[in-house]
Image: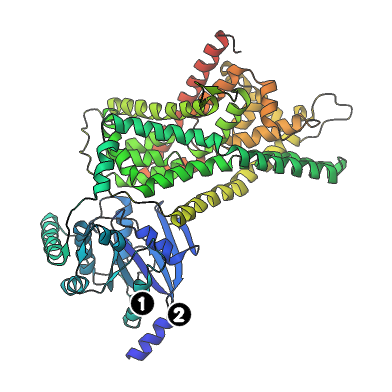
C-alpha cells in the first residue's frame, strides 16, 4: 500500500495502544493522564483479570484506544496477570485486538529492571515507543539521562513524561502522531519465551545500556532512606502500621457520620413523601408498600453506609499511591510466614478489606501455587466493605457512642476489634491449612522491590475512588434492588385475611420460611427475621441489612420504617446482637466471590470448601458468643 493510502487508513480508525511496564512505574498514572474520565474497567474474555481501557485524541486529531496492561517484569509469564500481558502484546488473546503500538513505560529513577523488559518487548517485533516517566523526580535526584544516546542504543523512539503534571504527556502524544502514519494493523507475532541464559544476557545488555546513557549520583532517595529507617523497623514499624489501621477505622465512624445523617434524612423524607402521596388502599396500597418498605427502606438501609465504604477505599488508595503498601508487606512477612502465608500475600489480603474479589484476583502476584491457594482460601475472612453496613448497624444500635480513655471512640474501637478478629482468624486458618493440607511444604523466599515514597496524586486517587463508589452504587441498583423485590414479595404475599389481628407479615411466605429455619438458628440466638435475612445475604452480605430493613418495615407498618437500628435495639437482646456480629466475622462468602474462587483455582472443590468451612466457623462463633453472653446476663 502506498504511504499516502496507509496514512489515510490509519486516520480513519482508532489506533490501538497498549501500555507495558513494571509494577509501580507510574503506568496507571500515565493512563489516567491520557484518558481522564474516558475509561472503563471490565475483565478480559474468559478470565477474572481486570481490563482497563480508555480513549484519547492526539493533537493532530487522531482517535486512539489505550489498554493499561497488568504490570510485569518479563514477558516470560509466571502469573495469570503476566500471561494476559504477554498474550495481548503478542496478539494471542482471543477477543482482544492486537495493539498497533506498544508504549513501554519506565520509571526514570530506576531504569535497570525496566530496560530488560524494553529489550524483551523489542524482540516481539511490534512498533515500540519508550516513555521515561517520573522525569521530574529523576531530575530532582540529580539523575541525568542522555535521551538521544538511549534512543540510538535501543533503536526505538524515546520520550520523557511526568504523568502527574499538567502537560506532562505532550511529548508522548506528539511522538504517537509522528509514528501513526507508519503503523499498520498487526496480528499474532512469532515469539519464543527466553530461557534463563537469555534473560541473564538481556540483563547484562540492559546494564550496559544504562551505564552508557544514565548517570545516577545516588540510587536511593535520602528521604526514602530516612523514612524506611523508622517505618521498616521490626518493632516501631509494626506499631506504626497498627496505629494507621486503628486511625482508619476510627475515621470510618467519625468522618462519615455527618454525611450518613444527611443520606438517612433524605431517605426518611422520601419515605414520608411516598406515604403521603399514595393511599394505603387496594392495589395502590401494594405499590405504596413496595416503594416505601421494599425500595426505600431496603436499598436505603444499605446506601446510607456509602460514606464509610468510601473512606475505607480512600485510605487504601492513599497508602498504595504513597508507596507504603510494599513496606507493610515486608513488615508482615515474618508474622505471615509463621502462619504459612507468603509475605507477598499481605497486599491481596489488605485489598480484601475493600472487597474479597479483587483481593483474590491480586493473588496472581504470588508465583507458588500452594502459597497462592492458601491466600485465596483465607482472603474471604478479611473484613470486606460489604460487612461495614452490618457492623455499623449493630454497633450503632447496641454500642454506646462514648469515649474510652478520654479520646478513643468506643464504637470505632469495637469496629477495630472486628477487623482484628478477621485478620487473626485468617492467620489461624492458614496455620491450620498448612498443617493439614500442605504439611511439609516450605515457604518460598519473599523478594519485592520497594518503590520510593511519592505524594499521591489527588486526581488519580479521585478517579480510582469514583470507580469503586460507582461499582458499589451499581451493585445497590442491581443485585441489592433485585433481592429487595424478592424479599418484599415474600414478606407481602399472601395478604392477611379479613379481620386479621396479627401483623401482616405473619401471614406471608417469608414468615413461613423464617419459622422453618428458626429451630436451627435458635441455639445461636437468631429469630425468624434473621433467618429470612441470612438466606439472601448469601448473594451479597449487605443484602442482609436491606432484608432486615424490609422485614421490620412491613412488620412495623405504623412506625418509622427507616429507623432500623432502633427497631433492632427494641427487639434483640445484646447477646443476639453480639452473636450476629460473630456470625458475620466468618459469614459465608457472597456468590460472586465463590465464583471467582472457582475460576481462579480452576476447581469447584475449593469454592465449596471455602463456603463449607466458613459456614461452620460462623455457626460455631455465633453459638459460643450467644451462650457466653447469655450466661453473663446479656441474654
Q: Are marks 1 and 2 in contact (CB under 8 Å)?
A: no
Q: Quickly name the residue at label 2.
A: 61
Q: Quickly name the residue at label 1.
A: 174
Give the label, 1 or 2, closer to the camera.
1
Measure the alpha-carbon separation of dots 1 and 2. 11 Å
State the image coordinates of residue 577 (x, y, percent, origin top left).
59, 22
- The crowding category of the residue bearing disc 1, from other C-alpha atoms within 10 Å (few below 14, some 14 to 19, many at least 20), is some
Does residue 383 show up?
no
- The crowding category of the residue bearing disc 2, from other C-alpha atoms within 10 Å (few below 14, some 14 to 19, many at least 20), is few
Q: Secondary structure at mark 2?
A: loop
Q: In the rendered picture of this protein, how many numbered marks are placed on residues?
A: 2
Q: Secondary structure at mark 1?
A: helix
Q: Specify the quadrant of the image occupied by residue 518.
A: top right
State the image coordinates of residue 136 (x, y, percent, origin top left).
31, 62
Q: Specify the quadrant of the image occupied by residue 483.
A: top right
**Left-right relation of 169 to 254:** left
Q: Is residue 621 above or below residue 330?
A: above
Which of disc 2 and disc 1 is earlier in sequence?
A: 2
State the image coordinates of residue 304 (x, y, percent, origin top left).
63, 40
Amino acid at each position: 500500500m502506498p504511504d499516502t493510502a496507509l496514512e489515510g487508513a490509519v486516520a480513519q480508525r482508532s489506533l490501538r495502544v497498549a501500555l507495558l511496564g513494571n509494577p509501580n512505574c507510574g503506568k496507571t498514572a500515565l493512563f489516567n493522564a491520557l484518558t481522564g474520565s474516558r475509561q472503563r474497567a471490565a475483565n478480559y474474555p474468559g478470565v477474572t483479570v481486570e481490563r482497563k481501557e480508555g480513549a484519547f485524541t492526539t493533537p493532530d486529531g487522531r482517535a486512539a484506544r489505550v489498554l493499561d496492561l497488568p504490570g510485569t517484569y518479563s514477558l516470560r509469564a509466571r502469573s495469570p496477570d503476566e500471561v494476559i500481558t504477554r498474550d495481548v502484546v503478542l496478539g494471542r488473546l482471543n477477543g482482544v485486538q492486537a495493539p498497533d503500538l506498544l508504549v513501554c513505560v519506565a520509571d526514570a529513577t530506576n531504569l535497570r529492571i525496566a530496560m530488560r523488559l524494553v529489550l524483551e518487548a523489542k524482540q516481539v517485533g511490534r512498533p515500540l515507543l519508550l516513555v521515561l516517566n517520573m522525569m521530574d523526580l529523576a531530575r530532582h535526584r540529580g539523575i541525568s539521562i542522555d535521551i538521544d544516546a538511549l534512543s540510538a542504543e535501543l533503536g526505538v523512539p524515546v520520550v520523557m513524561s511526568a504523568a502527574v503534571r499538567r502537560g506532562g504527556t505532550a511529548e508522548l502524544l506528539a511522538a504517537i502522531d509522528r509514528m501513526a502514519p507508519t503503523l499498520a494493523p498487526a496480528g499474532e507475532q512469532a515469539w519464543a519465551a527466553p530461557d534463563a541464559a537469555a534473560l541473564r544476557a538481556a540483563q547484562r545488555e540492559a546494564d550496559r545500556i544504562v551505564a552508557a546513557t544514565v548517570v545516577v549520583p545516588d540510587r536511593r532517595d535520602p528521604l526514602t532512606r530516612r523514612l524506611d529507617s523508622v517505618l521498616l523497623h521490626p518493632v516501631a514499624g509494626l506499631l506504626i502500621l497498627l496505629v494507621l489501621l486503628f486511625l482508619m477505622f476510627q475515621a470510618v465512624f467519625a468522618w462519615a457520620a455527618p454525611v450518613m445523617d444527611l443520606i438517612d434524612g433524605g431517605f426518611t423524607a422520601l419515605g414520608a413523601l411516598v406515604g403521603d402521596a399514595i393511599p394505603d388502599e387496594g392495589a395502590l396500597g401494594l405499590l405504596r408498600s413496595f416503594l416505601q418498605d421494599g425500595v426505600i427502606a431496603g436499598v436505603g438501609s444499605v446506601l446510607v453506609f456509602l460514606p464509610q465504604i468510601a473512606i475505607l477505599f480512600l485510605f487504601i488508595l492513599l497508602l498504595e499511591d504513597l508507596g507504603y503498601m510494599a513496606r507493610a508487606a515486608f513488615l508482615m512477612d515474618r508474622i505471615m510466614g509463621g502462619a504459612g502465608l507468603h509475605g507477598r500475600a499481605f497486599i491481596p489480603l489488605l485489598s480484601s478489606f475493600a472487597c474479597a474479589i479483587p483481593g483474590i484476583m491480586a493473588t496472581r502476584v504470588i508465583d507458588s501455587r500452594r502459597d497462592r491457594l492458601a491466600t485465596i482460601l483465607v482472603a474471604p475472612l478479611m473484613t470486606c466493605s460489604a460487612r461495614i453496613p452490618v457492623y455499623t448497624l449493630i454497633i450503632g444500635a447496641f454500642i454506646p457512642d462514648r469515649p474510652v480513655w478520654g479520646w478513643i471512640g468506643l464504637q470505632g474501637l469495637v469496629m477495630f476489634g472486628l477487623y482484628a478478629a478477621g485478620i487473626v482468624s485468617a492467620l489461624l486458618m492458614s496455620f491450620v491449612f498448612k498443617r493439614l493440607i500442605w504439611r511439609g511444604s516450605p515457604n518460598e523466599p519473599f523478594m519485592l522491590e520497594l518503590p520510593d515514597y511519592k505524594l499521591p496524586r489527588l486526581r488519580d486517587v479521585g478517579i480510582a475512588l469514583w470507580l469503586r463508589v460507582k461499582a458499589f452504587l451499581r451493585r445497590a441498583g442491581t443485585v441489592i434492588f433485585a433481592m429487595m423485590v424478592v424479599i418484599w414479595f415474600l414478606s407481602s404475599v399472601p395478604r392477611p385475611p379479613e379481620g386479621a389481628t396479627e401483623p401482616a407479615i405473619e401471614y406471608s411466605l417469608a414468615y413461613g420460611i423464617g419459622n422453618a429455619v428458626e429451630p436451627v438458628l435458635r441455639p445461636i440466638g437468631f429469630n425468624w427475621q434473621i433467618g429470612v435475612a441470612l438466606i439472601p445475604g448469601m448473594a451479597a452480605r449487605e443484602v442482609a441489612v436491606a432484608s432486615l430493613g424490609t422485614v421490620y418495615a412491613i412488620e412495623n407498618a405504623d412506625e418509622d420504617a427507616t429507623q432500623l437500628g432502633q427497631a433492632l435495639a427494641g427487639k434483640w437482646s445484646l447477646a443476639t446482637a453480639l452473636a450476629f456480629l460473630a456470625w458475620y466475622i466468618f459469614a459465608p462468602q457472597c456468590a460472586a466471590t465463590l465464583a471467582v474462587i472457582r475460576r481462579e483455582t480452576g476447581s469447584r472443590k475449593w469454592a465449596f470448601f471455602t463456603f463449607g468451612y466458613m459456614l461452620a466457623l460462623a455457626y460455631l462463633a455465633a453459638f459460643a458468643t450467644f451462650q457466653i453472653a447469655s450466661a453473663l446476663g446479656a441474654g
